[in-house]
């Protein structure tokens, strides 16, 4: 028997084994619970599993070390399109299919909130989903799951109870306005469409702080008047309560929780600095506070994991951890750390030959893991995100995948896990086989939008990114150029044209569709 023939037999057996595992998932009737934890502005470099030196993230790292870690994962450029892409299973560089609203309409005292009136204004520009439209929540609902969304809103920068419900969530608790998410002490939140006041939180803007450090900003941040209850504490409490009340051992029905946390999106706000960081001489007070936000997120993951253990349902629960976009800088300090769009010396990057790197801008944490760029850009640091899948005893512990995947692939991966079916008409492709050691290569390429313009990355590592305002397209080969320092247009003109043609097609024949999305202000609609 030739070596090639032996190799083919092994490949077929592995693929067959993975398929049998999928069949078992569906046919046993013992469907796994699923918890999707969605971090906000979390650069993967902030995590211990990617080498973070200044703080530990043991609970998140546990998901990576005892599950499968994906290293080649793409989110979107920033919050609103990332969430819409995630739950709809569609990429964000095509002609705008989402009606996105500006935030701010809910920044009022609780007694001045007229939910019916606000909803009517929003629905004029952002109607609830049409009957038959499929979203992440509806996929699970149709498979017999009870579903929940807890935390930050998942559509546009302002939403309504009707829209949330139309996306497939049986239970919902959290924010309806993105601008309010910039503070961590909300005077009210919404639970299943009902306004719920939070006693002790008195700031209309949820006590939003400032992104840069100064003596005045420090005092304002640590003035705790009207700041009694931290939003993440409320969210994790609701998640634990939902798990307990929907324990499948009592209900005979699996659950799916989508947990889009605010953390560690700034501006920075914490009630105390984590003990691990308090006496670290290498960090400023501002940096300790930011790192504490990451620690709080890690602690939330740990509490959820512990609850599953206590209820003896961990073995039949999948925990997925990922994020919306790449890293962002919230520790802006004069002479030490600058925002991602300016240098420490006061200049600006041209994003052609000069761009953000952690060492250039003073990001001591190297939150984008050594990559170029930040949130909103089409550099790798702006869109690469962590992704870990944990399922005790089912997904091989310590496994690593370098397969090209995107967060919009979660829809069809979860669809195959929950009901064995693929949702047609979506950009989303399932990588279920990968999770069980089977056939790989889900995508030949992925595309995404940015404030600069669209980009395309192939499974072999070729990347073409654009800067539309200058009509510039730059070719990189990522396997040899992690930091995107070597433009290869002259050496590979055919590859430039090949990828440019595909990218234009995926942008629905207009590269501008891969730029910043349009937002409508519902308060200005008559």
Image (cartoon, rainbow, N blue to C red):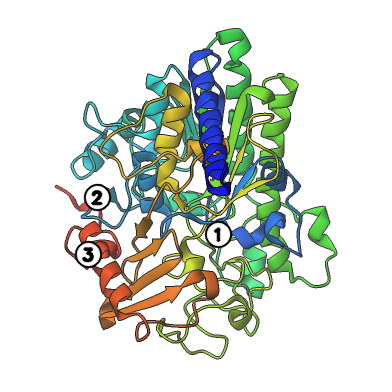
Cα separation between marks 2 and 1: 25 Å
Which residue is painted at 40% across and 37% down in the image? 411
Residue of label 2: 523
Q: Earlier in the sequence, mark 2 or mark 1?
A: 1
Q: Mark 3 or mark 2, which is nearer the start of the sequence?
A: 3
* Residue under the point 82% across and 56% down: 276
Asked if residue 20 lies left or right of residue 393, the reply is left
Residue 312, x across and y down, in percent: 72, 19
514 shown above or below 416? below
Residue at x-position 20% and y-position 45%: 125
In the rendered image, is residue 202 in sight?
A: no
Residue 446 or residue 310, whichever sits in front? 446
Q: Position of residue 34 (x, y in %)?
A: 54, 29
Residue where numbered disc 1 is placed: 266
Residue hosting label 3 = 504
Q: Nearer the viewer, residue 311 or 13?
A: 13
Residue farthest toward the front in the current orientation of the protein: 1
Q: Nearer the viewer, residue 519 or 434?
A: 434
**Where is residue 492, by image quadrant?**
bottom left
Residue 345 position (above or below residue 500)? below
SS type, badge 2: helix
Q: At 48% across and 19% down in the image, what residue appears?
A: 26
């Amino acid at each position: 028997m030739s070596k090639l023939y032996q190799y083919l037999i092994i490949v077929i057996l592995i693929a067959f084994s993975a398929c049998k595992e999928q069949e078992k998932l569906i046919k046993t009737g013992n469907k796994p619970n699923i918890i999707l934890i969605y971090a906000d502005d979390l650069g993967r470099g902030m995590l211990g599993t990617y080498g973070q030196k200044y703080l530990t993230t043991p609970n998140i790292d546990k998901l990576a070390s005892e599950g499968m870690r994906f290293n080649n994962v793409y989110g979107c450029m920033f919050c609103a399109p990332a969430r819409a892409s995630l739950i709809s299973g569609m990429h964000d560089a095509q002609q705008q299919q989402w009606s996105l609203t500006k935030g701010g309409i809910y920044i009022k005292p609780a007694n001045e909130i007229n939910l019916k009136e606000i909803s009517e204004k929003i629905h004029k520009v952002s109607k609830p989903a049409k009957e038959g439209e499929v979203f992440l929540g509806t996929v699970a609902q149709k498979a017999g799951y009870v579903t929940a969304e807890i935390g930050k809103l998942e559509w546009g920068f302002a939403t309504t109870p009707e829209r949330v419900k139309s996306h497939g969530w049986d239970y919902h608790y959290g924010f309806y306005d993105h601008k309010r998410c910039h503070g961590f002490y909300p005077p009210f939140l919404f639970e299943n469409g009902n306004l719920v006041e939070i006693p002790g939180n008195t700031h209309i803007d949820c006590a939003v702080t400032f992104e840069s450090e100064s003596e005045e900003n420090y005092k304002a941040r640590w003035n705790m008047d009207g700041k009694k209850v931290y939003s993440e504490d409320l969210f994790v409490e609701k998640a634990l309560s939902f798990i307990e009340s929907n324990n499948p051992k009592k209900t005979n029905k699996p659950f799916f929780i989508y947990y889009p946390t605010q953390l560690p999106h700034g501006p920075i706000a914490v009630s105390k600095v984590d003990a691990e960081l308090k006496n670290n001489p290498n960090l400023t007070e501002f940096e300790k506070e930011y790192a504490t936000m990451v620690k709080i997120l890690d602690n939330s993951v740990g509490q959820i994991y512990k609850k599953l253990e206590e209820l003896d349902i961990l073995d039949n629960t999948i925990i997925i951890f990922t994020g919306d976009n790449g890293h962002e800088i919230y520790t802006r300090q004069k002479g030490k750390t600058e925002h991602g769009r300016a240098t420490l010396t006061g200049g600006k990057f041209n994003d052609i030959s000069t761009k953000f790197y952690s060492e250039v801008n003073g990001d001591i944490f190297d939150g984008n893991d050594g990559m170029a760029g930040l949130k909103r850009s089409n550099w790798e640091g702006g869109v690469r995100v962590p992704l870990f899948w944990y399922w005790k005893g089912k997904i091989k512990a310590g496994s690593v995948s370098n397969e090209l995947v995107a967060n919009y692939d979660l829809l069809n991966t979860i669809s195959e896990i929950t009901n064995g079916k693929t949702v047609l008409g979506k950009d989303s492709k399932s990588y279920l086989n990968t999770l069980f050691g089977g056939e790989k290569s889900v995508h030949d390429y992925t595309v995404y939008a940015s404030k600069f313009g669209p980009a395309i990355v192939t499974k072999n590592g070729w990347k073409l990114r654009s800067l539309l305002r200058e009509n510039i397209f730059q070719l990189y080969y990522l396997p040899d150029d992690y930091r995107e320092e070597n433009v290869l247009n002259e050496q590979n003109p055919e590859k430039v044209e090949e990828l440019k043609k595909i990218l234009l097609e995926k942008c629905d024949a207009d590269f501008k569709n891969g730029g910043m999305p349009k937002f409508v202000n519902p308060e200005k609609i008559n």
